[in-house]
Amino acid sequence: IEFDTIKVGEVSTAVLPSYRVLVLPYFSQASPEETQTVCAYVQSGGKVIAFFRLPEELCQLLGVSLGPFLQDTPSHPFYAARFAPGELPGLPERMVQESWNIFTAYPTGNTRVIGGWVDAAGADSGHPAVFANDNGFFMNHVLTADEARAKSEFLLALIGRFVPEQWERSARKALGDFGKGERFTSVDSLRQRIRSRRAAGGLAPDAGTRAEQRVDEALALKAVAEGLCVEGKFPEVFAKARSASDTLTSAYYLLFPSRDEELRGMFVSSPNPAPDWKTVCQTLKACGFNAVFPYVGSAGIAHYHSQSVPTSPLVTEGADPLAECLAAAHDAGLKVFAWDNLFNVSDGDEGFRARMEAGRRLVPGVTGEASAYLCPTQPENQQLVVDSCLELVQGYAVDGLFLDYLRYPYRPGSRHCLCAACRRTFEAERGAPVANWPQDVIKGELADPFNAWQQQTISARLGGLRTALREARPGLVVSVAVFGWPDARKNVAQNLSAWLDAGSVDLPILMNYTDSASFFSKLAEGEAKEIGNRVPWCTALGAFSHAAQFASPVPLIDQIELTRKHGAGGFVVFKLNHTLLSEFLPALREGVTATDARLPAPRG
Ligand SMILES: [Zn+2]
């Protein structure tokens, strides 16, 4: 689809009339003048596809009336939009949104509702989702990145309603793209790859044959699409051509060996993930995964029953998401590593943070304001961390703890923490005051000694925590999030070598979030060298992270292969979403996780 982007603030009567359809992904920041411009565009025949909050005049033109705002609930009633059959050519049956809220909205005039909100099981919420009239379409939430395939079909169907010839263009493009994969450029190059992978060995006995069969199936589907093209049935051509390309790509996924021993984990950042814990755990297991890393909170918030840390509203109301996770995971045969953010209390409630700030227990920011991070130097903060972790392992049958933020905050160009307690403690240890605080410890002659002292502090924190945890639960696996970048690791005072020497970590997980395979490989190579054969270790793969958003399973497969090449004991994927669960994991199961794996045994 040919398109241009116009920023809010640059919408003018000079540019709009040259476009046939205007998509408004988020128009709530528009000025009254811009709203008038868009209304005039619609009144003179322009068409609009609009999302979420809209100015009243535009709502009237689209024939919708906005009501109150509604939040998501634990049953996830706005999980997907489902469309009535036959509403528009090419419209998907359902598209996953995982919407966290909606505007209630009602049709007025001749406007029709063409889709409604449903939960993951398909139960109707009773709330409409998508509205249509002759001026355009409206949806009462933003279009999320989930299920990109269905999203593209949805947008094409809507645009095709007003620009019918777009269907032919998109259909011919989809046919033309057949054979162009991310790691192959033609059907012949894929066939060549199948032959070389078969020759290299290590694949499942029938994988090569099945891959050849899928190439044949894909070519047959493409021939059907070409026939439909002659008949001018372009929405059908588009669907069939995509299906042909999917089948071809699925042949590629078969070309990777699996392993018998490997940790395969998934980070789950929501205590109450969609669709529900049971489905999540069973899907992970069915795709060859053997561990789940549920987020349980920090020293500032507990998504579990706690006496030492303020509990989240869900828990206060009586829910126990960690117990649900444990039941579902253990039932499915998955190990559970409770993921705790320790000193990072950014999602703790305001009352807690205000108390910590009043007690000067938070790391000061660059300009001196308090951050949402407990200073790891201070003994009372360490005590809070130890108490909350002990509660976790005493109250819940977790198999391990995954300790995140066991470090100082990362602030390039500066050094943290620089609180009064850190200064006092550092000066006491070296037996002399710092003449120019904090310049001397940031870039001056005391920078290295200060960093060494910080590293010792963090190492002592981990040592103390692990001893307490192992006394409470002898078999517990203590896993720690370790910065992958060696420079960054030094800056936040994580001395992995010292931890390994002291025997205070059972399972280091190296956070190698990147979309570059070569950089990933370089990091893993250094990590393998540093860790040696002392403990099993894992890479964390940032499929959906601040550093990367994988568009397909291909980069994930690449990083899993590199993880193995460098001798790691497994990988943990960041972080669960619908795309991973429904698209990426089934692709891994075709090859790279085709057989179930046991967890790596402790070494030494
Ligand atoms: Zn401090």
Image (cartoon, rainbow, N blue to C red):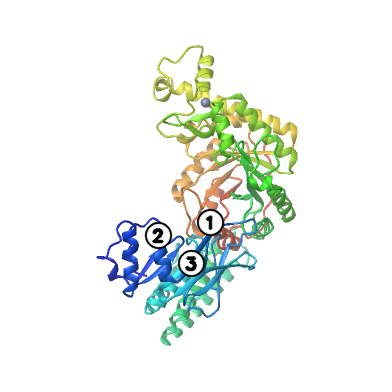
Residue 456 vertical placement versus 37 (above, below):
above
Depth check, mark 2 against mark 3: the one in front is 3
Q: What distance separates the C-alpha of mark 2 from that of mark 3? A: 16 Å
Residue 182: mark in rendering: none
Question: Would you identify the image quadrant in which residue 230 lies?
Answer: bottom left
Residue that appears at 34% across and 57% down: 31
Q: Which residue is mark 2?
A: 27
The residue identified by callout 3 is: 65
Give the amino acid type for the residue marked by disc 3 in the picture. Ser
* Quadrant of the rendered image containing residue 495: top right
Question: Circle 3 — which element?
Answer: strand
> Do labels 1 and 3 touch, CB within 8 Å?
no
Q: Badge 2: how crowded within 10 Å, few (<14), some, or many (20+)? A: some
User: For the residues carrying marks 1 and 3, which lies nearer the camera in this image?
Assistant: 3
Residue 478 at x, y percent in the picture: 66, 37
* Callout 1 amino acid: Ile
Label 1 secondary element = helix
Instruction: Tell me if 309 is positioned left or right of 253 in this view.
Output: right
Q: From where the camera sits, is residue 261 visible?
A: no
Residue 55 coordinates in the image, percent (x, y): 41, 61
**Residue 515 x, y percent position in the rendering:** 45, 51
Which is nearer the N-term, disc 1 or disc 3?
A: 3
Q: Secondary structure at mark 2?
A: loop
* Nearer to us in this view, 488 or 598: 488
Which amino acid, by three-letter code, is at mark 2? Answer: Phe
Per the model, the C-alpha gap separating discs 1 and 2 is: 38 Å
Local crowd size for mark 1, using a 10 Å CA cut-off: few (<14), some (14–19), many (≥20)? some
What label does residue 557 carry, if any? 1
